[in-house]
Image (cartoon, helix red, strand yellow):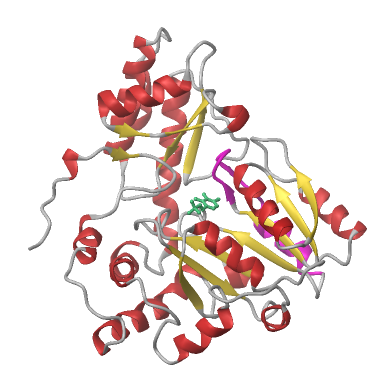
């Protein structure tokens, strides 16, 4: 039995992951289960493994691991790092902090660049830091730091790291790949991590990783103990048409539909679509009197600064309970001060409009007078 399109019964996910899932993807994931060691599944796996590198814009293989995005981040580390290695962690928000902690827990010698929240890393500071620490083995960076909605200048940072033959640029592209122009091979990115519940428009549960030619010697020599995330085993299994462990059959079926119909090799079209959605969200938010928080905003998520006296947590809750629209709030010092609207999933202008109208309604109720007509003019 095919699932009904009952999406109107469910809240609209305008969060930066998980996101709205296209109907054809939901249907593929609801099919009766098959075993993963069968010709039927092997055909699906072969197809997705062939399609994934196009999205990463690489000629290298892309691996699928059953884990959340943070598992993918840890996998990138255990597969390239030896205890005591010097790691430069670029920390521009919550996800940067998480990666730094992971590297510390794996006994790396971690140095950091702490970027003020809302800003992107200064490329010259990366250059100077590497000049002062030429023995750095890994540089960790978020392409989009989802907690502050900024884009980092990954391409420029890659041009610097490329000058160090024994140093890799490891990129968390979880909310950038498929949404921005990110090009692994052309830009010289060494490890790229993505995850299913963001631009891939799937439920949480898959991480995707690829390693450049420059990264492979690191993979072969890394001394951090690894077993579940050992990419060498996965590489061997994939070459035999299988995954090392049980495959996440339902998610991979969904992935096949995503890669065939929604996130094809033609990234340019996607990029335009998301940039337009982000632009419209930002401008209509500004028309409501909510300035953009990020200095160089990402097309995957828009952070809007809330007016003094408006409790962001209460606003978020009102949107959820009264309008069935889920947006994200701010974290840590930004709690209650910003809202973050994600536009990565199966959403378009009508969903952005609905969100802006609900936002204006609630802001007016909470005492911040704003003019929804002015905001809607931006969207039209
Ligand atoms: C969502 C996200 C992650 C992964 O989070 P999980 O909850 O582990 O899937 C990592 N980095 C960034 C930048 C993200 O947006």
Q: Residue at x 26, y 37 (%)?
A: 11
Q: Is residue 192 above or below residue 176?
A: below
Tell me residue 285's x, y (percent): 44, 26
Q: Position of residue 73 (x, y in %)?
A: 58, 61
Residue 152: x %, y % from top left: 64, 49
- Residue that protrudes farthest toward the right in the picture: 132
Residue found farthest to the left:
1
Q: Quadrant of the N terminus?
A: bottom left
Count the numbered circles shown: 0
**357, 35: nearer the viewer:** 35
Look at 34% across and 17% down and name the residue there: 362
How far from the left and from the top, in percent, is residue 358? 31, 24
Judge whether residue 181 can be spotted in this image.
Answer: no
User: Bounds of the magenta span?
Assistant: 144-163
Question: For this view, does 194 lie left or right of residue 101?
Answer: left
Q: Looking at the image, which residue is at 30% across and 24% down?
A: 357
Q: Is residue 229 above or below residue 269?
A: below
Residue 119 falls left or right of residue 161: left
Would residue 42 be seen by someone viewing this image from the given angle?
Answer: yes
Front residue of 268/17: it is: 17
| Residue 320: quarter of image | top left
- Who's the residue at 72% across and 46% down the image? 121
Magenta stretch: residue 240 in it? no
């Amino acid at each position: 039995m095919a699932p009904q399109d009952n999406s109107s019964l469910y809240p609209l996910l305008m969060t930066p992951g998980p996101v709205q899932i296209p109907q054809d993807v939901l249907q593929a994931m609801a099919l009766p289960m098959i075993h993963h060691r069968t010709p039927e599944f092997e055909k699906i796996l072969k197809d997705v493994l062939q399609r994934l590198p196009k999205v990463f814009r690489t000629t290298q293989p892309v691996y699928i691991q059953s884990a959340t995005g943070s598992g993918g981040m840890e996998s990138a580390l255990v597969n390239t790092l030896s205890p005591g290695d010097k790691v430069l962690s670029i920390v521009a928000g919550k996800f940067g902090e998480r990666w730094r902690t992971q590297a510390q827990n794996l006994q790396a010698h971690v140095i950091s660049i702490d970027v003020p929240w809302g800003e992107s890393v200064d490329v010259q500071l990366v250059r100077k830091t590497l000049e002062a620490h030429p023995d750095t083995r890994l540089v960790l960076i978020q392409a989009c730091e989802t907690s502050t909605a900024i884009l980092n200048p990954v391409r420029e940072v890659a041009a610097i790291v490329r000058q160090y033959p024994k140093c890799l640029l490891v990129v968390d592209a979880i909310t950038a790949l498929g949404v921005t122009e990110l090009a692994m091979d052309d830009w010289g990115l060494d490890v790229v991590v993505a995850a299913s519940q963001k631009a891939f428009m799937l439920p949480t549960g898959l991480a995707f990783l690829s390693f450049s030619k420059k990264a492979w010697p690191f993979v072969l020599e890394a001394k951090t103990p690894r077993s579940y995330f050992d990419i060498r085993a996965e590489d061997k299994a994939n070459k035999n048409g299988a995954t090392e462990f049980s495959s996440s059959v339902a998610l991979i079926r969904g992935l096949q539909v995503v890669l065939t119909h929604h996130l094809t090799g033609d990234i340019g079209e996607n990029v335009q679509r998301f940039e337009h959605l982000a632009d419209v969200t930002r401008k209509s938010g500004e028309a409501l009197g909510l300035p953009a928080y990020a200095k160089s905003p990402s097309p995957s998520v828009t952070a809007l600064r809330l007016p003094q006296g408006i409790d962001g947590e209460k606003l978020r809750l009102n949107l959820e309970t009264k309008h069935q629209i889920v947006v994200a709030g701010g974290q840590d010092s930004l709690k209650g001060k910003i809202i973050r609207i994600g536009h990565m999933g199966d959403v378009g202008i009508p969903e952005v409009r609905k969100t802006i109208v609900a936002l204006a309604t609630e802001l007016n109720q909470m005492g911040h007078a704003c003019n929804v007509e002015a905001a809607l003019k931006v969207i039209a």
